[in-house]
């Protein structure tokens, strides 16, 4: 028995239409994600000045503990006492170092107190990963 050769030669081919459709969908997804991501870093090159002066910042540093209580200069303090401290001095910034499990209402109350006394700069303290 002899084998017969196929009369029609079949060529193998790759259909690129599904590949192009898939790549287009991936590029569209990446473009949308790039537009949605917030700007996390701005590189600013400051110009030189012949006349300048150093500004001094008076920063009030407050810790918010897990239970929602506050520490000022490593001593427990209430929100009312903190208000009298703020009103007795001129602070330009407040540094809030809140525990990651601190109640949200305690942090917001501290931010509201800062706004009430016209403290414009709110700084949030964090730790570096090790």
Image (cartoon, rainbow, N blue to C red):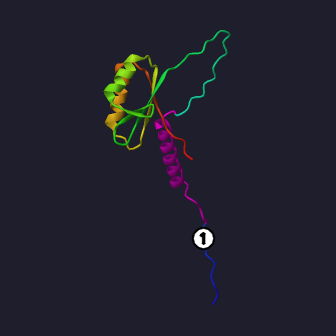
| Residue interval drawn in magenta | 11-39
Instruction: Name the main secondary structure of what is drawn in magenta.
Output: helix
Q: Nearer the viewer, residue 40 or 94?
A: 94
**In which quarter of the view is residue 52 placed?**
top right
Q: Residue at x 35, y 21 (%)?
A: 84
**Residue 125 picture location, percent across and down:** 48, 35
| Residue 115 drawn above or below residue 65 | above
Q: Residue at x 34, y 38 (%)?
A: 68
Instruction: Specify whether residue 28 is painted magenta.
Output: yes
**Residue 81 picture location, percent across and down:** 34, 26
Instruction: Specify whether residue 18 is painted magenta.
Output: yes
| Residue 11 drawn above or below residue 124 | below
For this orientation, the residue located farthest to the bottom is 1
Q: Residue at x 55, y 32 (%)?
A: 41
- Answer with left or right where residue 42 lies relative to residue 98: right
- Answer with left or right where residue 2 lies relative to residue 80: right
Q: Residue at x 41, y 43 (%)?
A: 100
- Answer with left or right where residue 91 lies relative to residue 112: right
**Residue 80 picture location, percent across and down:** 31, 26
Residue bearing mark 1: 8
Q: Nearer the viewer, residue 109 or 43?
A: 109
């Amino acid at each position: 028995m002899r084998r017969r050769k196929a009369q029609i030669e079949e060529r193998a081919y790759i259909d690129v239409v599904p590949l192009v459709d898939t790549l287009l969908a991936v590029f569209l997804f990446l473009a949308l994600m790039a537009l949605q991501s917030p700007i996390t870093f701005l590189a600013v090159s400051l110009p030189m000045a012949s006349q300048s002066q150093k500004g001094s910042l008076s920063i009030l540093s407050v810790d918010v503990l897990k239970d929602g209580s506050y520490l000022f200069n490593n001593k427990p303090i209430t929100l009312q006492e903190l208000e009298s401290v703020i009103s007795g001095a001129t602070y330009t910034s407040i540094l809030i170092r809140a525990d990651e499990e601190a109640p949200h209402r305690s942090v917001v109350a501290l931010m509201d107190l800062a706004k009430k006394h016209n403290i414009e700069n709110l700084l949030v303290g964090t730790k570096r990963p090790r």
